[in-house]
Every structure is written in C-alpha cells, then in structure tokens.
Amino acid sequence: MDIEHSVTVKLLFFAKSKELSGFKETTLSIPKKISYKQLLNIIAKKYNLETIKNNILLAKNEVVCEETVDIVVSDRDSIAVIPPLSGG
C-alpha cells in the first residue's frame, strides 16, 4: 500500500458488520486509489468481517461502488460497509 499517497476515510458499519467489528464508525488510512477487492479485503481482515466478506457491499459517500472499478477517495470521504440485510 502506498502510505505516502494515502488519505483518511471514515468507515461506517451497519447491521451485522457493526456487530462483528464492534464499531459503528472509525477511520482508516488507505491509498487515494484502490481497487474494490483490495479495500474489501483490508476491511474484512482488519475488522473481523471474513465470515460475511462475500456478501458485503461498499458505498462511497452513499453511492454503492462497482466491484470492477477502482475507488478514488479524498480525505473525509465516507465508506459504508453494508452487509446483507434481512427484513420482514
């Protein structure tokens, strides 16, 4: 990871991701440009989300990210970690 060109983003956890991580929100330093898969792997490993990793959606500033497109972030952007939701 290119720490020299990193930014600090706010991570927001919802539902099962909040329960597993133990956080409602926190911050994380990541490169300004990162692939969806890289970011997902970092978050899953660091915040104990391996068991739900394949079902998580990531959203930047309330817009769901595409898995095939690199994510470009700036300081103070927010990344939401959205696990599968069930309802009824």
Image (cartoon, rainbow, N blue to C red):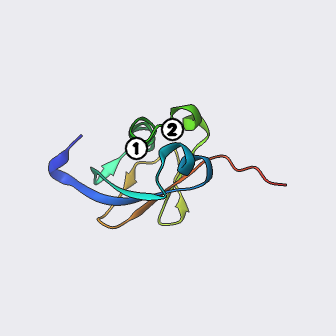
Per the image, label 2 sits on a secondary structure element best described as loop
One can see residue 6 in this view: yes
Per the image, label 1 sits on a secondary structure element best described as helix
Residue drawn at (19%, 53%) of the image: 5
| Residue 70 appears left or right of 80 | left
Q: In which quarter of the image is residue 10?
A: bottom left
Q: Is residue 53 above or below residue 71?
A: above
| Residue 28 appears left or right of 88 | left
Q: Give the Cα distance between marks 1 and 2.
A: 12 Å
Whether residues under marks 1 and 2 lie with C-beta atoms below 8 angstroms apart, the answer is: no
Residue drawn at (54%, 36%) of the image: 53
Residue at image mark 2: 49
Q: Which residue lies furthest to the left in this view?
A: 4
10 Å crowding of disc 2: few (<14), some (14-19), many (20+) = many
Residue drawn at (54%, 51%) of the image: 18
Q: In which quarter of the image is residue 46?
A: top left
Foreground residue among 33 and 41: 41
Q: Which quarter of the rendering shows the C terminus?
A: bottom right
10 Å crowding of disc 1: few (<14), some (14-19), many (20+) = some
**Residue 71 horizontal/vertical position (percent):** 40, 52
Foreground residue among 81 and 25: 25
Foreground residue among 87 and 71: 87
